[in-house]
Amino acid sequence: MDLSWESHGIAFISMIPSLNSMIDIHCHILPGLDDGSQSLAESIEMAQFLVSMGYKKVLASTHIKSGIYNNTAAIIQKKCETLQTALDARGIDLKIIPFVELYLDETVLNKIEAGVIPSYNNRILVEGPMNNWPDYLDSILFKIKTKGFSPILAHVERNRVLNRHPDRIRELKDDGVEIQVEALSIVSHYGESARSCVQELLKLDLVDYIATDLHGMPANPEIFSMAKAEIIQIVGENRWTELHGKKLEEEVLAWN
Ligand SMILES: [Fe+2]
């Protein structure tokens, strides 16, 4: 299989100089653990795609959701090691780090206390339902913080309640919840309400992270170039890069 940049018809080389420190904090790259990659070959192809876009690290945000995705930190760690070995053997310069996309329900605090949830720099990526935002979710987010972890709320613009109320998103952020949006929302990949919401959040500087949320090789890889161009028009190229995990890298440097 030809996995070169040219095989996707994209001149990614022009994107690389300003993107070489980027982290993708939301990506289902581990094979066979959730609804993301389904094989090691697919994961390797995704890794090559991410490298071509300028990413150096991926937080392998594997779903954990009661009764559906019963993954644990140990399972995710082991799969990361297997994928990392495969990437290293092929000279693919991408660091794979265990992470989670944790579904917010009444079990999450017990899971955190049991030590089965992987975190990165004390961050835990969490997701809620898409169609509503029950009040108890605010309480769970607060309790996660009392356990010493900082929640990042995944693809906030895709929630059909929150995306109509940016002020509600600001309240969450003011309460210490970091905000992640999908790069592809800006090109209406998730509908018009998600697009308009992410546009407003970027303008209001309420976004902490932009991520791919890849679940496999995209059918049309060029859509990521289109998304990048749209987002840079709003926030500029430096901020585009910063929103790919710069704050996490700065924290790691400060702690060491
Ligand atoms: Fe995801």
Image: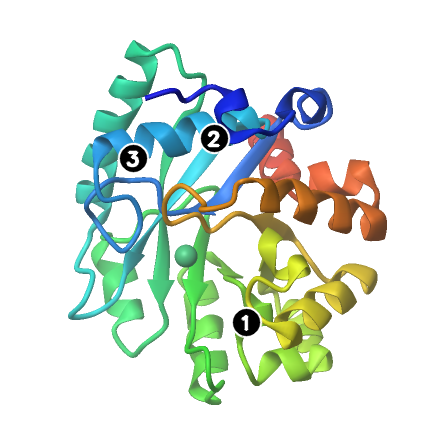
**Measured Cα–Cα span from mark 2 to mark 1:** 24 Å
Q: Earlier in the sequence, mark 3 or mark 1?
A: 3
Q: Nearer the viewer, residue 233 or 164?
A: 233
Q: Is residue 141 above or below residue 178?
A: below
Quadrant location, the N terminus: top left
Q: Which disc number belongs to residue 158?
A: 1
Q: Give the image location of residue 139, x and y in percent.
A: 46, 81
> In the rendered view, does 156 fall on the left or right side of 206?
left
Amino acid at circle 3: Glu
Amino acid at circle 2: Phe
> In the rendered view, does 116 fall on the left or right side of 120?
left
Q: Give the image location of residue 49, x and y in percent.
A: 47, 30
Q: Is residue 256 in view? A: no
The residue indicated by pointer 2 is 49
> In the rendered view, does 55 fall on the left or right side of 168?
left
Q: Nearer the viewer, residue 31 or 57?
A: 31
Please tell me which residue is depicted at 78% across the width and 42% down the height of the picture: 239
**Measured Cα–Cα span from mark 3 to mark 1:** 26 Å
Q: Is residue 227 above or below residue 128?
A: above
Q: Which disc number belongs to residue 197?
A: none
Amino acid at circle 1: Arg
Find residue 110 and report its image quarter: bottom left
Ligand 1 quadrant in view: bottom left
**Measured Cα–Cα span from mark 3 to mark 2:** 11 Å
The residue indicated by pointer 3 is 42
Quadrant location, the C terminus: top right
Label 2 neighbour load within 10 Å: few <14, some 14-19, many 20+: many
Q: Earlier in the sequence, mark 2 or mark 1?
A: 2
